[in-house]
């Protein structure tokens, strides 16, 4: 498993709720988390299949921004 990290604008529980269905489906429940206490709102994803570009696209499709940390 590889671990990828991204700076995002996912900054609250409501935002996390909005991306949860997409990330749970693609990365799997328990394989991702957002540290909203971090100023960069770091999204950490653990996956063998997903690339950084795919994760960024998933987050953007959910209405948020992400960039490789």
Image (tube, rainbow, N blue to C red):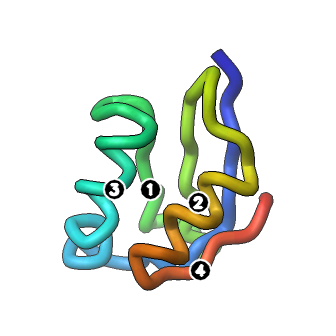
The N terminus: image quadrant: top right
For residue 25, side relative to residue 44 (left or right): left
* Residue 9 % position (x, y): 53, 81
Mark 3–mark 1 Cα distance, whole angstroms, equals 14 Å
Looking at the image, is mark 3 or mark 4 earlier in the sequence? Answer: 3
Mark 2 or 4, which is nearer the eye? 4
Secondary structure at badge 3 equals helix
Q: Is residue 1 above or below residue 61?
A: above
Mark 3 or 4, which is nearer the eye? 3
The residue that mark 3 highlights is: 22
Q: Residues within 10 Å of mark 3 (few under 14, many from 20)?
A: some
* Residue 11 % position (x, y): 41, 78
The C terminus: image quadrant: bottom right
Mark identifier at residue 52: none
The residue that mark 2 highlights is: 42
Mark identifier at residue 65: 4
Q: Residues within 10 Å of mark 2 (few under 14, many from 20)?
A: many
The residue that mark 1 highlights is: 34
Looking at the image, is mark 2 or mark 3 earlier in the sequence? Answer: 3
Secondary structure at badge 4 equals loop
Mark 4 or 1, which is nearer the eye? 4
Q: Is residue 40 above or below residue 68?
A: below
Q: Residues within 10 Å of mark 4 (few under 14, many from 20)?
A: some
At a point 63% along the width and 37% down the height, the residue shown is 50
């Amino acid at each position: 498993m590889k671990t990828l990290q991204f700076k995002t604008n996912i900054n609250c529980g409501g935002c996390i709720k909005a991306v949860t269905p997409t990330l749970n489906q693609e990365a799997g429940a328990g394989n991702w988390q957002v540290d909203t206490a971090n100023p960069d709102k770091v999204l950490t994803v653990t996956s063998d299949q997903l690339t950084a570009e795919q994760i960024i696209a998933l987050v953007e499709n959910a209405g948020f921004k992400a960039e490789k940390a």
